[in-house]
Image (spheres, rainbow, N blue to C red):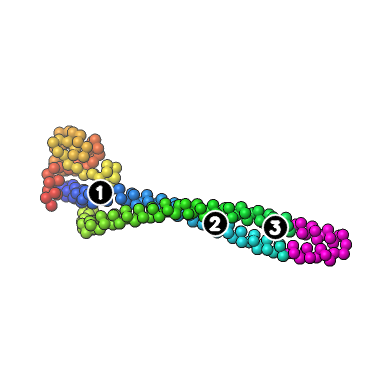
Amino acid sequence: MIDRLSTLFELQLIDDELDTLQDLRGDLPIEVNNLNSQIQNIKDTVEEKENEKEAAIETLKSNESEIERLNSSLKKFKSQLYQVRNNKEYDALTKEIDHSEEKIKTYEAENIELENQIQKLKGDIEEVSPQLEELLEEVKVKEEELKTIVKANEREETKLSAKRETVAEKIRKSDYNTYTRIRKALSGKAVVTISRGACTGCHNVVPPQRQIEIRNSKRLFTCESCGRLLISPNVAAEVKKG
Ligand SMILES: [Zn+2]
């Protein structure tokens, strides 16, 4: 039983050290994440606008070639006007001419709108470009900072992680799950000891009878106040001695 308790405490000590290394990174990981998602959002918007712009340019070009085509038929119709033989032919031709002119006007009006739209999209894209540059610069700096910190502790972290794996293997699955659950819920500390009759996790008094039982190390006890696993100070001291 003592082995079961001391292994859990051993795991806690390793995790304490790993937590300290994590703390050295401060808010940098969160900041880098936030910056990256801001950057992604801007990039998505720019891409959307680029696509819209491309589509508008396509339509504009196809309208222009339509106008060109209509203009050349218009020219043909107008020259035919001089060769008409009767009113019926004349009416038919003028109808064609009116129709073509109407269509040209519609395309031209649409193109003016498209030009405006393209200019506006270009402006929108250019407007966010300095902001994007700034964010990219900022994230680069923060990523470098983070990399430096991670690199400085890389060897120690690798060593601790390997040690953790060895210790974790010795722990029975149910204990490990309990440990993980408490650690997650109570920000870090899952296994604590008692000191001056109180739980060192939450500083609430542990009943005297319970204190004796904990010192006997016959089974796993949890603090009635905070739910952390409680182990005897003797066991803790032995583990710390290594
Ligand atoms: Zn407690």
Q: Are marks 1 and 3 in contact (CB under 8 Å)?
A: no
Q: Which residue is mark 2?
A: 53
28 lies above or below 80: above
- For label 2, the crowd category at 10 Å Cα-Cα, with few meaning under 14, some 14 to 19 and many 20 or more, is many
Residue for point 71% across, 62% down? 70
- For label 3, the crowd category at 10 Å Cα-Cα, with few meaning under 14, some 14 to 19 and many 20 or more, is many
- For label 1, the crowd category at 10 Å Cα-Cα, with few meaning under 14, some 14 to 19 and many 20 or more, is few
Of 206 and 202, which appears nearest the observer? 202
Dot 1: what SS? helix
Residue situated furthest right in the rendering? 86
Work out how far the residue at label 2 is from the one at label 1, CA to CA, in angstroms: 46 Å
Work out how far the residue at label 1 is from the one at label 3, CA to CA, in angstroms: 69 Å
Dot 3: what SS? helix
Q: The magenta stretch spans which residues? A: 73-99
Dot 2: what SS? helix
Q: Is mark 2 within 8 Å of ligand 1?
A: no
Q: Which residue is mark 1?
A: 23
